[in-house]
Amino acid sequence: MTLASRPSLVDGTGIRLPAAVLALLALSACSTPTPPAPSAPVALATQFSNEQPGAPAAQALDAAWWDGFGDVTLARLVNEALSTNQDVAMALQRVRQARAGADAQGSRLLPTVGLQAGVSRSESGVPDAVKQGLPDTRALRVGVDVSWEIDLAGGVQATRDAAQADALAAAAGVHGARLLVASEVGRQYFVLRSAEERLRIVQALAAAQRQTALRVEGRLREGQASAFDLDRARAEADALDAQVPALRMLLGTTQTKLAVLLGRNPSAQVVASDQAFAWAAPRVIAAGQPSELLRRRPDLVAAEARVGAEALRSEEARAQWWPKLYLSALVGRQDLRLNALDLAPVAFSNVAMAFAAPIFNAGRIEAGIKVQSARADEALLAWQKAVLVAVQEVEDSLLVRSQEADRAAALALTVQNRRRSLQRAESLQREGQIDLLVLLDVQRSVLASELALSDGRLQQALADVQLYKALGGGLPPVDPTRADTSSLASRTTP
């Protein structure tokens, strides 16, 4: 490494740089080539194999898909969570960090300018005759300092572009966090409503079992039933009562989970009980083409951005083989006083250029290139795996959704038939034509079928939520240059 220093290159108009330096500056402005978009590991099909026939076009995917359930409470909860959830707020702060990091890396492409100022005073205290050779001095000095690393190989610009790709990945992470929060609120809300419904079913049937036990007790006093029949009827009612605490625990834990998702106090109730709640009717959801997931799912957008970022960092690692050129200049004026003589203010300047090139580093640069190349390959493999997993999740969600719809339809018919059989069994038991054991068996079958139907409706709703999540939802992409990074306190309800 050599360092060349030249005398003043400054006149009244400023610094005059030689033509060679100007050429280097022009080279430093060259842009880093944009990494090519990664290719999918396998050829994607034109449509999902498990999609229902007659599905609408992909653009029909609801932007606010939770509104499609027709539940005002659900829509209110999701909208509140999107503005108050801590995970979304943290994702926004990650965008803020990534944007600042990109700005910091981009600043390296421009010169650094600083201001220097100093004052000095020296008095020897010797006689005036001696001060001719050792004068008292006072100096006032003001100057502008400029330093610049000229990006000859494009390594600095590659670093800046990689940081911008990180900002894009962070912005996609905001979209992903919003999607996860919305889907989790929907899931917990439907679990809550299903638990309320099952609790009502169990309590209603337990009350019916208690009435049956009272009738058996009356018949026992009349000698028309045995103590065994009474114990069996009471045991069935007690068994139903034993299911109530578990359902109440599910209600309580779901309330606290919703409170955390909304950024509320978990000790306060979030959702009031709704006796009139009804499950939404099944509807067709557009799945579109598998290739559209690459732009619709935020995790795939973020993974692709990370692939680009690592590829750019590989360019930065390879740029370490190139020479580095540093330019610095200090320009200013100073006011000097020697003894009692004031000298006129004079200009001063110092321009230096440093050149550095690697010759021997024991393989450190090559090792760094290999490390970064492996990271870039890992990011590409992660993106390719994410693509396959995304298609799998959509296919699985479509399959589960269609099968749960068939299951719920069959369970609805089962409940209708068993309720009619229960009415006949109760009538026959009151007339003494069947014994209590038959009636209890019919009551158990009705309970099982009603609970299964409630679970089937829950699974249908959860399948809808999972499909919207797998498709990437309908939330608009987040622009990293316009992402809201306001503080959590300003967006959290008390």
Image: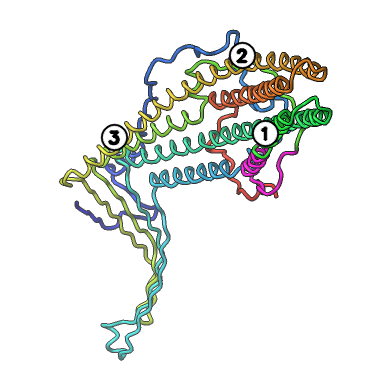
Q: Nearer the viewer, residue 286 or 185?
A: 185
Q: Visible in this render: residue 228?
A: yes
Residue furthest out toward the front: 223
Residue closest to the eye, 230 or 37 = 230
Point out the tag, 2 or 3, that comes first from the N-terminus.
3
- In the image, residue 299 lies at what x, y percent? 48, 31
Q: Earlier in the sequence, mark 2 or mark 1?
A: 1
Q: Quadrant of residue 74?
A: top right
374 or 399: nearer the eye? 399
Amino acid identity at mark 3? Ser
Which residue corresponds to the image point at 74% horizontal and 33% vertical from the top-left? 203
The location of residue 456, given as percent across then percent down, is 63, 22
Which of marks 3 and 1 precedes in the sequence? Answer: 1
Image location of residue 37, percent across then percent down: 39, 25
Distance CA(mark 2)–CA(mark 3): 50 Å
Q: Position of residue 419 (x, y in %)?
A: 74, 17
Q: Which residue is mark 3?
A: 373
The label number, if any, that marks residue 239 in the structure image: 1
In terms of image quadrants, where is residue 336? Answer: bottom left
Residue that carries the numbered disc 2 in the rendered image: 406
Instruction: Compare residues 193 and 340 and report the one nearer the observer.
Output: 193
Kind of residue indicated by mark 1: Ala
10 Å crowding of disc 1: few (<14), some (14-19), many (20+): few
Say what amino acid the circle numbered 2 marks. Answer: Asp
**Image position of 412 with respect to 217: above or below:** above
Above-or-below relation of 26 to 142: above
**Is 215 on the left or on the right of 459, as rendered?**
right
Foreground tag (2 vs 3)? 2
